[in-house]
Image (cartoon, rainbow, N blue to C red):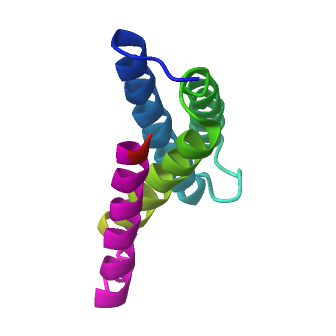
């Protein structure tokens, strides 16, 4: 089902927020230390639930395949970038190239929808 105007724009904004929350809970898993630390564990749980709820709202008007792929892509991209920044994970040329492919895929999916 294709919508135009305000609802379509809002669905994309909601989807981006859902993807950012996907990143929050993914990175938060590192801080939760296997759910042994209560506050980070609660944050992970809340971010995960909120992320899925927002994805569900966005999927009401966006194609589910596109919405899901972009949601996962934003979360994965953010988790890798935050891993480099926060946890000194390697930023090798190969990883950066793969991230650029991921960004290209996310943009391509948006343009095709």
Quarter where residue 9 is shown? top left
- Judge whether 113 appears above or below 56 on screen: below
**From what the image shows, is residue 54 above or below residue 87?**
above
* Outermost residue, right side: 35
- Image quadrant assignment for residue 100: bottom left
Q: How many marks?
A: 0
Residue 91, magenta (yes or no): yes
Report the quarter where the C terminus lies. Answer: top left
Quarter holding the N terminus is top right
At which x and y percent is residue 50? 59, 27
Magenta residues span: 86-111
In terms of image quadrants, where is residue 67?
top right
Residue furthest toward the bottom? 93
Q: Residue at x 63, y 59 (%)?
A: 33
Q: Please, what is the dominant secondary structure of the magenta stretch?
A: helix
- Report whether 97 appears left or right of 18: left
The residue depicted at 28 percent of the width and 88 percent of the height is 93
Q: Is residue 6 magenta?
A: no
In the rendered image, residue 17, in percent from the top left (x then y), is placed at 42, 32
Nearer to the camera, 105 or 32: 105
Residue at 34%, 13% (x, y): give it: 5
Q: Residue at x 34, y 11 (%)?
A: 6
Place of residue 94 in the rendered image (x, y in percent of width and height, measured from the top left): 36, 88
């Amino acid at each position: 089902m294709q919508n135009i105007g305000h609802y379509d724009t809002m669905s994309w904004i909601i989807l981006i927020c859902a993807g950012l929350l996907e990143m929050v809970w993914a990175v938060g898993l590192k801080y939760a230390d296997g759910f042994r630390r209560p506050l980070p564990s609660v944050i992970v749980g809340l971010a995960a639930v909120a992320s899925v709820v927002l994805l569900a709202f966005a999927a009401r008007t966006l194609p589910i395949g596109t919405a899901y792929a972009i949601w996962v892509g934003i979360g994965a991209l953010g988790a890798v970038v935050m891993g480099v920044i926060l946890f000194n994970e390697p930023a090798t040329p190969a990883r950066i190239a793969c991230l650029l492919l991921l960004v290209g895929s996310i943009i391509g999916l948006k343009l095709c929808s």
